[in-house]
Image (cartoon, rainbow, N blue to C red):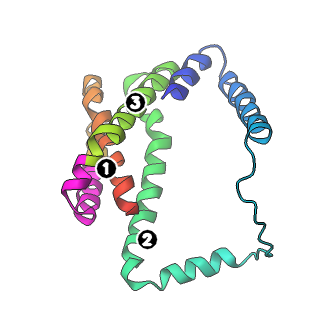
């Protein structure tokens, strides 16, 4: 939740600065991993990977009749969510006149609510209801919530909109993996 906030603030100085800082932090993270974390897989398994392993695995998954609909549904969801998540700043800039710093703050607000949902709200729902209805309804409500943005709501509505979107995504992800 701090990344979008800091990225937005750094972008006030230069649009390149957040990327430079991210590269430095990534490099430091890599150095820490190599120096401080020992290898946990002590048994080396020697196998030669093939370029066709991925294609074979996709073919195996596609042949699972009971899961085919789920795979297609989640491929569509992932494409749609990625598209939404990448281009929502364009909507915010064009409709609301936001700056990069504003966008960073809104992303941090959404990410904070996502973290709160995953920590406190999702487990009680997952304990009470079965996974297929949770996935079905959270996908449906998430779709309607995202479509509501086409109505160009007032900026004050974003205070409610972002928590709703992040609640449905937080509800969808763990229940879809079970």
Residue 73 point in image, percent of width and height: 38, 67
Reply above or below: 12 against 80: above
Q: Quadrant of residue 121?
A: top left
Q: Is residue 142 magenta?
A: yes
Farthest residue, direction top: 13
Q: CA distance from mark 2 to mark 1?
A: 18 Å
Q: Residue at x 75, y 28 (%)?
A: 24
Tell me the element at label 3: helix
Foreground of the two, 33 or 42:
42
Q: Position of residue 97 (x, y in %)?
A: 42, 21
Q: Position of residue 133 (x, y in %)?
A: 22, 63
Q: Which residue is mark 1?
A: 171
- Callout in the foreground (2, 3): 3
Tell me: residue 49, above or below residue 102.
below
Regarding residue 116, the answer to whether it shows in the image is yes
Viewer can see residue 93: no
Classify 10 Å Cα crowding around label 3: few (below 14), some (14-19), many (20 and above).
some
Q: Main secondary structure of the magenta part?
A: helix
In the picture of the structure, the residue carrying the numbered disc 2 is 71
How far across and how far down the image is residue 92, in percent? 41, 30
Reading the image, the residue beneath label 3 is: 112
Viewer-proximal residue among 89 and 73 = 73
Q: Quadrant of residue 26?
A: top right
């Amino acid at each position: 939740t701090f990344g979008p906030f800091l990225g937005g603030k750094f972008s006030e100085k230069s649009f390149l600065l957040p990327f430079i800082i991210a590269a430095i932090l990534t490099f430091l993270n890599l150095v820490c991993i190599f120096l401080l974390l020992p290898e946990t897989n002590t048994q080396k398994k020697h196998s030669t990977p093939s370029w066709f392993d991925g294609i074979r695995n996709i073919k195996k998954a596609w042949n699972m009749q009971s899961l085919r609909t789920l795979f297609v549904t989640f491929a569509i969801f992932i494409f749609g969510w990625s598209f939404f998540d990448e281009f929502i700043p364009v909507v915010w800039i064009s409709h609301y006149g936001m700056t990069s710093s504003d966008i960073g703050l809104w992303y941090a607000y959404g990410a904070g609510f996502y973290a709160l949902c995953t920590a406190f709200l999702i487990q009680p729902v997952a304990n009470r209801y079965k996974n297929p209805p949770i996935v079905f309804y959270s996908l449906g409500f998430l779709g309607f919530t995202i479509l509501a943005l086409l109505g160009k709501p007032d900026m004050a509505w974003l205070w409610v909109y972002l928590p709703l979107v992040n609640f449905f995504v937080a509800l969808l992800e763990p229940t879809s993996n079970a």
